[in-house]
Image (cartoon, rainbow, N blue to C red):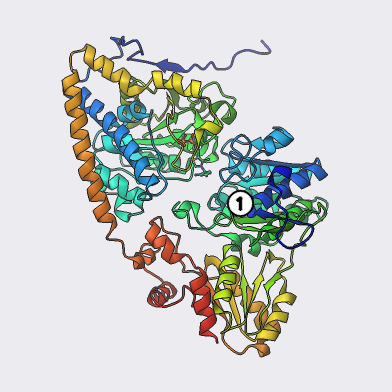
Amino acid sequence: MSTEARPGAGTPGTETMTVREAIRAALREEMERDDRVFLMGEDVATFGGVFDVSDGLLDEFGDERIRDTPISEAGFTGAGVGAAATGSRPVIEIMFSDFLGVPMEQIMNQMAKMRYMFGGKTDMPVTVRTTEGGGMGAASQHSGTVHTWFAHFPGLLAVTPGTPAAAKGLLKSAIRSDDPVFFFENKMIYEQEGDVPTDPDFTIPLGEAHVEREGDDVTVVATQRLVGESLSAADELDGEVSVEVIDLRSLYPLDTDTLVESVEKTGRLVVADESPLSYGVHAEVMARINDRAFFSLDAPMQRVGVPDTHIPFSPALEAEVLPDADDVRAAVENVT
Amino acid sequence: MPRETAVDFAIDRVQVLAPDGSVDEELDPDLPEDRLLGLYRTMKLSRRLDERAIALQRRGELGTYAPAIGQEAAQVGSAGALSESDWMVTSFRETPAYLTRGTPPHVLLWYAMGMEEGAAVPRETRNMPPSVPVGSQALHAAGLGWAQEIRDEDAATIGYFGDGATSEGDVYEALNLAGVYSSHAVFFCQNNQYAISVPREKQTKAETLAQKAISAGIEGVQVDGNDVLGTYAVTRDALESARGGDPVLVEALTYRRSLHTTADDPSVYRLEEEEAEWEARDPIERFEAYLRDRGALSDERIAEIEASIEDELAEEIERAKEGAQRIDPADMFEYVYATAPPELERQRADFGGESDGE
Ligand SMILES: Cc1ncc(C[n+]2csc(CCOP(=O)(O)OP(=O)(O)O)c2C)c(N)n1
């Protein structure tokens, strides 16, 4: 929307926006482009979402396409599955990813399996937007990072943007996809700014990682908030260590080629993701490198994440548990 | 006859102390004056604690906090009807109910500061800690009440939740399980008219929330939630019925006069006129006027009570802050498991080192 437009700092054809504005712009553009697209969830209409992401969209699109739902995650997720199977393209918002357990039956046994069990005869063009991450003093039941579950489950796709451009481009691709896509928004980066292409045809393919900063010595593969943290760490280390930072963007499909190419150059890998360390995104990235670039490695691969705990309510503990630029930096220093 | 009424249902609404100060003689629980004054003081204490907690949160000394301003009669009346052997299961807005059950303010503040002492479940108090995932705790109440039936206990369980929670499958399943198993549960739904920004009418087409009991085959009743004598009387009867294996759903009609939580801005979704209407129906003022009429309260007595509340809260807040300074960062590894697995032990050992990584 023009009121939000700020010409991009450097790049022609872009404007500077926050992650929040980028997500809103993607929703707006896709709803304008295709009238089968609609948004539903708790407090998304009148309130504009508890993080203001859909603010203003009710006025633009009306209450048939921007819908407040009862507090019934299983209900409206299931209704979304039915809508998607019969030709609509719903975007479902689950206010906090911690509540994805409520509609899990609809996700695991319906959304993920319907195409397969019906021999490919149904599409499932549903997008599930949800928030993740600690940092708000909101306690364990509002702070988790659960994207690994969905990346792990056959039939589902999962993306975790770390910049405004990635957020916009990936959400547009998610909405256009005929497969279910989980779109994970880290709630601490809604205010983060960046240049975003304005062309309504701009999308970012699902399954493409992006080199945010080139470097020669160490590859840092990061997701969500940790992309920015890793870029800060790289800045701090500038002159000592040349760090390449990659925004993984998609968890599934996972862009192994870009990662392999980078590790073949640097010989060192740090994976930074806010999930608990065990059985996480970290492990999958490392396994892929092990398969395809093992002999390029000069040092053991490192992971930066959250210990196998929940996110504590106490702000003092929460600050300790959440990984940041210092942790990325320490991991880089460990291997150089 | 091809079509006839199979069963007929009705939902009663109860009010004991009307806004004009009149009291229904028949329904009046006839509490002794010191009990009445006790309920009054707890309502006032809760109001002040909420106000002070919001201020503390604004100064960064407290995490997200959900005030119960406007709902004091609903909670103090209902929790006041519990006996010591009854259990209480709460959602996240039950400051008045906890205070009624004797939980000191500093413990409630500890919870909001993220101190584990704030969420302890001391057996002797029979209060569960708050539950934030909406509606989930209704099932715990159904289960606790079921255990009371199995053990043949002369006790009941009250389970609190909001109007929005009645849309969750968990709440339907709780009502149904309670009916099937003769659970000693009283489900206490505070219909405070909003679930964050979503008004009650958008939550369900049902005329009352109490009638949701009907589909589970249990009793449902509405009560004026801003009438502390009414919520006391209705809950007392419901608990009696539940102790005998007949669970009840109570819907208390009230209003959340303040914020959903400290992260909220109600001006986006409701009108000031509506807020003003409910301010005029404030539960504390109604009860205060009644107590004055009875001669149980005077200006002087009220001033004394208010001063004692200020003193108590000053001390309690001080105590909460002192306790909060005792947090040790390594505590974050505690309590994930009863027995910490080796990998978690190793992460704990590494912690304090440079990286959160391995
Ligand atoms: C399962 C689940 N979904 C969503 C939320 C986010 N949320 C927290 S409180 C709330 C509204 C609850 O409304 P209501 O049940 O009426 O209780 P009230 O807040 O009015 O006391 C919502 C949607 C949550 N905590 N849990």
Residue B164 placement, left or right of B125: right
Where residue A185 sits, quadrant-wise, is bottom right
Query: Which secondary structure lies at badge 1?
Result: strand
Query: In this picture, is B7 found above or below A47?
Result: above
Report the front residue among B314 and B9. B314
Rendered residue at 25%/27% (across/down): B39
Q: Which amino acid does label 1 sit on?
A: Thr
Residue A187 placement, left or right of B153: right
Give the letter of the chain under mark 1. Answer: A
> Image quadrant for the N terminus of chain A?
top right
Q: Mark 1 points at which residue?
A: A130
Rendered residue at 40%/43% (across/down): B65
Report the front residue among A305 and A287. A305
> How far across and down, in percent of the image, does residue A42 sit?
59, 40
Disc 1 residue lies near ligand 1 with CB under 8 A: no
Query: In this picture, is A121 found above or below B173?
Result: below
Residue A202 placement, left or right of B55: right
Report the front residue among A262 and B169. A262
> How far across and down, in percent of the image, does residue A118 sit?
79, 52
Residue B90 placement, left or right of B263: left
Where residue B351 sits, quadrant-wise, is bottom left
> How far across and down, in percent of the image, does residue A163 sit?
65, 61
Query: In this picture, is A257 found above or below B66?
Result: below
> How far across and down, in percent of the image, does residue B187 sit?
41, 32
Q: How crowded is the residue under tag 1: few (<14 C-alpha within 10 Å), some, or many (20+)? A: many
